[in-house]
Image (cartoon, coloured by chain):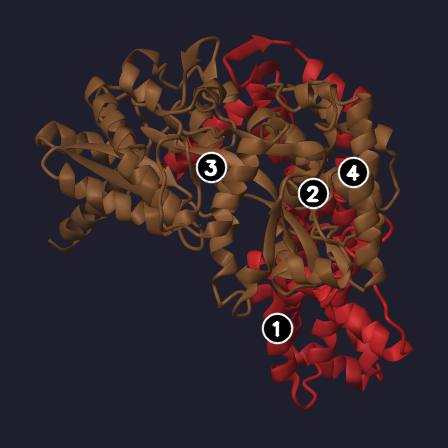
Chain colours: A brown, B red
Amino acid sequence: MKKSIRKCLVALLTCSMAVSLFVGCSKEKGGTAPDTESSNVNNTEETGKIVEISFPTSWVGVSTNTEWFNDRLAAFNEQYKDKYKVVVEEIAGDQAYVDKMKVLYSSNSLPDVISAGGYNLIDPMKDQLKDLTDYIDADWKAANSEVCWNVNSRDGKIYGIPYSRQVIGYFYNKDLFAKAGITEPAKTWDEFFVQCDKLLAAGITPVSMDTADSGWLTSLILGAMVASTDEGEQFMNTSLPSNYNTPEFINAAAMIQKMFQKYTTSDAIGGKYENGASNFFMEQTAIIANGPWMVSDFYDTAMVEEGFADKIGTAMFPEGVMYNSGKIGFHIASKTEDKLNASLDFVRFLTSKESQQKMLEMTGDIPSDVTVTSDTIYPIINEVIENGNNAARNINDFQSLWYANVVDEISIQYPLLAQGEITPEKFAAALTKAAEKN
Amino acid sequence: MRVKKSMMLCFLLPCILLFALIYLIPMGIVFITSFYDWRAGGVFHFVGLDNYMEAFINDTRMHQALKNTGIWALLQSIVHVGIGTITAFLLARKRRGWKVLRTIFMIPNVISAAALGVIFLNVFNSKYGLINSFIGGITGKDFSKNWYFDQNTAFLTVTWSWLLYAGLVMILILAGVMSVSDDIIEAAKIDGASGFKIDLKIRLPLVRNILGTCVIISATSMLREFELIYLTTNGGPGITTLNLPLYLYKTSLTDNNYGYANMMGVLLIILGIFVVFTINKLFRMNESDY
């Protein structure tokens, strides 16, 4: 008797172990989306009426868009509670988000809706992204500026739905400028460097720079320097450039090298955006290049001293250069018709006039819909928009246009350039070599 | 007790299935696709040994990554294990406070790599880092060195992130040393052996297998090291601190070149097997002197 019970137990245990193996590996019948999120989603869909869609987002934690997104998500779920449900996966950081999407892409399991914070996923993934051209009606198309559709399209097909524009110049500390005897922002790069010398003479470190991640602060200045000529402006509006061995790029790299060696903080090499921003907030540097989403931080007394925002001025880059372009928006990779419709409704909701207005008010992101305005935004944001409207040269953001591995390469080449280990020519050659790998 | 073969198979089956599903099949796929040009955008065609030829002949990054990985594996096998072993033998003498010291020595091993990376970035920060402040305090002059991003110091600074923290080695060797029979030690003492001689001639040979295990663990950990490099230098400046796992990651996720990345995966597996086999032979594992 005892022996048979033991045998039964052994058999039961063995079976349960074997079954448990397959539980985690199960996949819905006939499904085309093998990721776990989607698997759960389809089960619900088969049994109920509510269509669930997956949306991984980096709008979490300290992201400036978190509050806006939570507000919009709650509103969408409320409005469509009998029809759709959005399953949100939180991924902290844009780079981590992009990496995750690449992994999902390689296994053909992209989520229903994607928004990569402006990173270009269209070129490497467009074979799995929905061509949305036929779903965008005339009203929807007319609501957004042409530059926004351009950056989201390839060969006449729309792969992304825009929600904001990139309008980027630089911010400067008026008090520190006054202390150095500077009355207004520089009009040319020569004048810019004269002002840097004046700031140095007054004991002020001129510019916040960084090298980590994509070297965002530094690369913005680099791009603006490149775009100071007609050829450079064209280069900065070229999608996926493969040759960086151009005179304008090499000249810009030489100026960046000079800035690293003379006009920035010692923690810029290896430093992240946060280090550069922190130096500017603590008034240790006088200039920082960035977009209007930073403005809300100028009023946040947890980060800056009371009244800090009053000291801040906005400027175009020398030679009238501004980053003024569309931003890559929402992609859809749904594999079934009902999920596609749900995803379209979700994206339509997030890019509606109401959502864009809330985004402008809550985050400072400039809407892609040029008719959206607000009286309740910080005045500094309006100044940035005004600069964008008056810029002589409008260029696109390097993260949207350059190959992802070039953006990564630039970050590991900056320290070498900064320390004089490589020449600007070698810097340009290294980026060209990285681009050629694609 | 006789065990039925069918019963053995029943118990082994889950493990075999698990191994096949999670390791064997993916490893097979990695091996096969390492002979393909496989990139994002649907590119997938057979290229034979092209990936391997490119890696060994033209790819300077690959050469640097292999060199760095090799140096780190060697340093870890000798210096890291050496530090852990010496510490274990010192602690085994059970002088006052040895338990506290043992715990303190283990602390870096229980901190996550992500936290360690951030800690080290701050400790070695050029502007407000502890090291620069300390040197400045001693010399009385402002000292600024960008340890992680100066080409001359980056490799050593990254190496510092793991080389000295041999808590795991120490705890394994200590367990081995403590388990050496008192009778043998007593006999050696009666024969007039000093403490140092007992350690060198009796205890050390008796823990040879554990020492070999520690060397395998330490050397192979360098074939997997990723987080600390990614979080501190990301392989830079330039390619100064690039190793194979990081290069594999970048090739796969940044360059979207999956075939070439899988070739590196195959190289890592071969390297791992080679390291385990060589150390097994060197330490004559599974053989006993006594």
In the foreground, A231 or B161: A231
Rounded to the nearest angstrom, the CA distance separating label 2 from label 4 is 15 Å
Mark 3 neighbour class, 10 Å CA radius: few under 14, some 14 to 19, many 20 or more: many
Mark 4 → mark 3, Cα distance in angstroms: 30 Å
Q: Which numbered disc covers residue A218?
A: 2
| Res. A32 image quadrant | top left
| The label number, if any, that marks residue A117 in the structure image | 3
| Residue B92 picture quarter | bottom right
At 57% across and 23% down in the image, what residue appears? Answer: B258
Gap in angstroms between the C-alphas marked 1 and 3: 58 Å
In the image, what residue type sits under mark 2? Thr
Q: CA distance from mark 1 to mark 2?
A: 59 Å
Q: Look at mark 4 in the image and give the residue it sits on.
A: A189
Real-space CA distance between mark 1 and mark 4, rounded to the nearest whole angstrom: 73 Å
Please give the chain letter of the residue carrying mark 1: B
The disc numbered 3 marks a residue on which chain? A
In the drawing, what numbered circle is on residue B179?
Answer: 1
Q: Nearer the viewer, residue A359 or B98?
A: A359
- Marks 1 & 2 on one chain: no
Above or below, A423 against B137 in this view is above
Amino acid tagged 3: Gly
Observer-side mark, 2 or 4, equals 4
